[in-house]
Image (spheres, coloured by chain):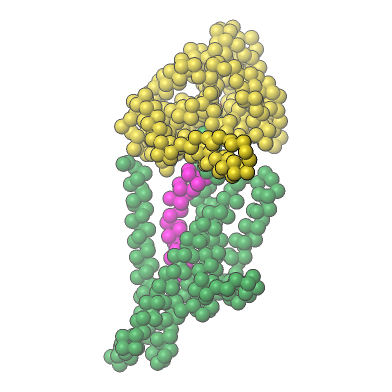
Chain colours: A yellow, B green
Amino acid sequence: MIEVVNLKKVYGKLTVLDNISEKINAGEKVAIIGPSGSGKSTFLRCLNCLEDPTAGSIFFEGKDLADLSVNINLSRRHIGMVFQQFNLFNNKSVLDNIAMAPILVAKEERRKALRHNFAVSVSNIFSKKKKAKCAVRKKDDIKKEAYDNAMRLLKRIGLEEKAKNYPSTLSGGQKQRIAIVRALAMNPKVMLFDEPTSALDPEMVGEVLDLIKQVADEGMTMVIVTHEMGFAREVADRVLFMDKGQIIEQGSPDELFNHPKHPRLVEFLSKVL
Amino acid sequence: MQAKWEVFYDKFIVYDGWQTVVDGLIATLQIAVSGLLIGIVLGTLIAAVKVVPKTNFVAKFLSVICDIYVGFFRGTPIVVQLLIGYFVLFPALGVQLKALNAAIAIFGMNSGAYISEIMRSGIQSVDGGQLEAARAVGLSFSVSMVKVVIPQAIKNILPTLGNEFIVLIKETSVASFITVVDLTKAFKDIASSNYEYIIPYLMLALVYLVLVIIITLGIKLLERRLAVVDRSR
Ligand SMILES: Nc1ncnc2c1ncn2[C@@H]1O[C@H](COP(=O)(O)OP(=O)(O)OP(=O)(O)O)[C@@H](O)[C@H]1O
Ligand SMILES: [Mg+2]
C-alpha cells in the first residue's frame, strides 16, 4: 500500500530519518514505538508529505509522493491522518468539520466535470465522432450526501447531539473521536495516527482506543505511532522500533515485546513496560 | 456667541450648507469603507504571500515586491501618496479617475499595507495544526487558508482591524488635498465663507467623534456575537 524507499529527512545538520526503507501492506496494522526524538512523528508525517522528505521516495498507489510534480492533494485524500492535538477546525461546527472536505472535494470534481463537458461540446461541433459527456452532480445532492454521511459517522460515535457544537465546547476524547471520523469521511485507504491518545486525560483514552480498534477490525490499513504498549500489542500485526532515525528492529508484537533482541530495544522496553 | 450661532445657522440651513456637509460625510464614509474593504483584500493577499513557504523563485520574488510595497506605503505620509497617485501615477498610467475614486484607491492601497501586517500576525496567531489538518485531508494551500486559517485570523484581529477602520476614517480628512470634498472640506468651506471658525470646526470634531464612537460600539457588538458562536450553539 505504501512503500518507502531510502527515505531521508534532515533538519539543518540534524539527520532525523536516516535512509529508511519500509513497506506497509494493504490491511496491515503497523505500530511504531521508540524513544522521544527518535523520528517517529517525522516518519509518519513524511508518509503523506506533511513533512517534505530530504531524499528518497514514498510510493502510494503507484505514485511517488516525494516527487513534486505529483499532485499531493489528490493522494492525501486517500490517506487519513489523526493528530496528537486533534486539530479540529475551530471555526467550524462539528458537523462541518466532518463534511467540509468531502463537500469541497466533490465540488472541485463537479467543476472539473463541467469544464470537461464544455470542452466536449466545443469539440463535438467540429468533429464527426461525438464524444460523450460525463455526469455532473447537483450541488444540493453533494451537500446532502456529505451531511448525511457526517451525521451517520457522528451517530456511530454517539455524538450526534453535538453536531451543531463548536470544538471548543468538547472534551478531548470527544474531539479526538470526531477527528477520527473526520478522516474516515474521506473514505481513506490508509490511516495514520500520531500518538492519538497522548494529549488525553487518562479516563478518555479508552473511548478513543476503542474507536481505533473498531476501525482496525473493519480492515483499515493503519500506521500508529503510540506510547500505549498494551494497545500496540493488541492491535498491531507488526511493530516497528525506531531509534535515532532508523528502524532498528521489527516483528510481530510477540517477537518484539517478549523476545526483544537489540540492546536498545531491551533498554527501551525495560523503561516503558 | 449668539451672533456666531446665527451666522452658522444662516450658512448651514438657509443657504443649504447642510447639503454639502451630508455629501461630505457620504464621501468620507465611502472612502473609509471602500478603502477598508480594498485594504482587507490587498492586505490578505500580501499576508498570504508573506506566509507561504519561500521554496521557489516566484514566492521569493513576490515576497520582495510585497516588502517594497508595504515599505513605501508605511514609509511615506498619506498626503504624499495622494498627491503622487492623483497627479503623477494615475495620469502617467493613463488611468482617468474622479478625485473620489482616486482617493478610494489610494486609501485602499495604503490601508492594505497596514492590514497586511495585522493580517500576518493574525495568521501566525492561528495554531499551525489547523493548516496541517486541512492539508492532510487533501485541501490545497489556498483553499485551506481561505476556509480554515483566514476566518480564524480575522476573528483574532477584529479589534485591531476596527482600530484600523477608525484610523482610516480620521485620515480621510486629508482627501481634500486632491480636491475631494469630504467632511472636513465641507465644514472648512462653511467656515471660510464668512470667517467664523469656532462653531463649524467644533461641529466637525463632534461628527468625527460620533462616527468613531458608533464604530467602536459596532465592533464590540460583532466581537461578542462571534464569541457566542464560539462557545455554544
Ligand atoms: N521542524 C523541525 N525543525 C527542526 N528539528 C525538528 C523539527 N521537527 C522535529 N525535529 C527534530 O527531529 C527529531 C525527531 O522528532 P520527532 O518529532 O519525529 O520525534 P518523535 O519520535 O515523534 O518524538 P516524540 O515521541 O517526542 O513525539 C527531534 O530531535 C526533533 O527535535
Ligand atoms: Mg512525535
Query: Residue A84, how many percent across, how many down?
Result: 49, 30
Residue at 39% across, 22% down: A207
Q: How many marks?
A: 0
Above-or-below relation of B220 to A59: below
Query: Residue B151, how many percent across, how many down?
Result: 46, 48
Residue A35 seen in the figure: yes
Which quarter of the figure has residue B73?
bottom right
Residue at 69% across, 37% down: A12
Which sits in the foreground, A51 or B35?
A: B35
Which quarter of the figure has residue B20?
bottom left
First to last magenta residue range: B145-170
Horizontal side, residue B215 vs residue B161: left or right: left
Above-or-below relation of B111 to A157: below
Query: Residue A18, how many percent across, how many down?
Result: 69, 25
Which sits in the foreground, A195 or B80?
A: B80
Horizontal side, residue B144 vs residue A261: left or right: left
Horizontal side, residue A17 vs residue B147: left or right: right
Above-or-below relation of A151 to A260: below
Which quarter of the figure has residue B29?
bottom left
Residue B1 seen in the figure: no
Residue at 43% across, 55% down: B158
Residue at 42% across, 33% down: A146
Which sits in the foreground, B158 or A120?
A: A120
Could you tell me what secondary structure mostly forms the magenta stretch?
helix
Which sits in the foreground, A135 or A5?
A: A135
Query: Residue B42, how many percent across, how many down?
Result: 54, 58
> Which quadrant of the rendered structure holds the N terminus of chain A?
top right
The residue furthest left is B2
Q: Does the segment drawn in magenta span residue B204?
A: no
Q: Does the segment drawn in magenta span residue B155?
A: yes
